[in-house]
Amino acid sequence: MAWKRWIAGTTLFLSGFSTSLLAQQTATPAESSPSPVLLTLKRAIELALQNSKDIQLAKIQARVSDQTANVTNSEFRPNLYAGSGAGYTYGLPETPGSRPPSVFSVSYTQSILNGPLRGLAREQEEQARAQRLVLEETRTSVMVQVATSYLELVKVRHSLELLRKEKDSAEKIAEITQQRQGEGFELPVEVTKAQLTRAQVVQRILQLEGRQDELEVFLRNQLGLAQEQAIELTAEDLPGAAEQEGATLIASAAQNNPSIAFAESNVKAKEFRLAGEKRGYWPTLDLVGVYSVLAKYNYHNFTDPVIRSLQYNNLNGGINVQVPLFSSKTRANVALAQANLEAAKINLAGKRNQVSAEVRQKSRKVQQTDAGKEVSRLELQLAQQNLATTQSLFNEGRMNLRDVERARLDESEKWMLFLDSSFRRQQAQLELLRTAGQLDKVLE
């Protein structure tokens, strides 16, 4: 009997141990999964501005433009070089640069007056400034994309809730219709219609679930979230400042639109380049200096007293002036710079006209979507009133359950149309604010 009790105790112990181990293994994935993140529209935009790869790339490109301008400007700053070398000479000693061989040399260069080079440097500085405008445009684009995706995801999730309720109503309608057809009160075509309605609802649910997944993946990538991290959103509209700014958007578009600012910067850059190329007819002036320690063994075999009297420590310094007497290249460069400037001015005028037209067009679109939203709101209100009336008649026994479910199905459809119209209005507002250069004042 003792050994039976020992076997039973051991079995119970092993069973409890395995159950505990299995529970730990089951709990591990849940503990390791990232916790859901609760987002507001403002918080989503803040995370996107911090983590967006597009913005990071635009910052690098702006830094590249700055460094490109610095490379050109370095010609107007002191440049000091030191060097040495070894080689074989036969005859009069000289290097490929027609300088005597040296054991050690130090050279100094600095450009003082060089019109074309100065014009190129100023053009590149203005281009670097324009690249910073591109960075701001990239930030604005990311803000619009994130805000649009956020608002659409809110709409999609709400629509999915409504569709799942529609599915329940469609299934009840199909069930009741099929039952009445079996009793001889309905034609088979009515059953097919009810089944078709149910299938259409299921199809729309699958489509919206796919869209929901696409929006969540996009937001995770832009916001720097983990791939499997759940996202919880707060349903909200655009800030009220959007409507307050709406009356002054057209007037401020010419001053704040990024494409106009970029075109203006391009005109300035071409003006700097043209002015610099015109100075190509002027003399250029450079500071130069060379200190060399010559190799003694290169000169001791020569009998010429001039060569033998050379100093082994040599210092040369001064200015190098070049006066252009006739330069076909300068004339061609001036003509090219003039043509580029004229093209930039035409592009600027076109951008101003285009932006003005876009602001007017998008302002009208906002008004149209406002009207569409009001129509959808009234249709939803009417459907809700019809549902309340149908429900009251059903409670009195004057309507059947199928009529109630159809009214509920119609109310759900009107809800989805209202959500769509609200989202279209938000999209129109975002595009209008972006065109007028006022988006950061509303979303940041």
Image (spheres, helix red, strand yellow):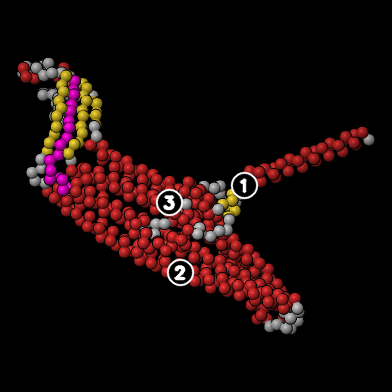
Q: Mark 3 or 1 closer to N-term?
A: 1
Circle nearer the viewer, 1 or 2: 2
State the separation of the CA atoms marked 1 and 2.
41 Å
Residue 98 sits in which quadrant?
Answer: top left
Q: Residue 254 lies in magenta, yes or no?
A: no
In magenta, the rendered stretch is 277-293
Q: How crowded is mark 3: few (under 14 residues within 10 Å), some or many (20 or more)?
A: many
The residue that label 1 is drawn on is 35
- Location of residue 240 with respect to 75 vertically, above or below: below
Between 146 and 3, the one nearer to me in the picture:
146
Does residue 385 appear in the picture of this structure? yes
State the separation of the CA atoms marked 2 and 3.
27 Å
**Residue type, numbered disc 1:** Ser
Q: Evaluate if marks 1 and 2 touch, with contact meaning CB atoms under 8 Å apart.
A: no
Q: Residues within 10 Å of mark 2 (few under 14, many from 20)?
A: some
The residue that label 2 is drawn on is 367
Does residue 179 appear in the picture of this structure? no
The residue at the point 63 percent across, 63 percent down is: 161
Is residue 404 rendered to the left or right of residue 243?
Answer: right
Name the spot of residue 301 as percent of width and height, x first.
11, 16
Q: Evaluate if marks 3 and 1 touch, with contact meaning CB atoms under 8 Å apart.
A: no
The residue at the point 49 percent across, 71 percent down is: 371
Name the spot of residue 97 as percent of width and height, x first.
16, 31
Between 297 and 442, the one nearer to me in the picture:
442
Circle nearer the viewer, 2 or 3: 2
Is residue 328 rendered to the left or right of residue 65?
Answer: left
**Residue type, numbered disc 2:** Gln
- Location of residue 243 with respect to 262 vertically, above or below: below
Q: Mark 1 or 2 closer to N-term?
A: 1
Circle nearer the viewer, 3 or 1: 3
Q: Mark 2 or 3 closer to N-term?
A: 3
State the separation of the CA atoms marked 3 and 1.
28 Å
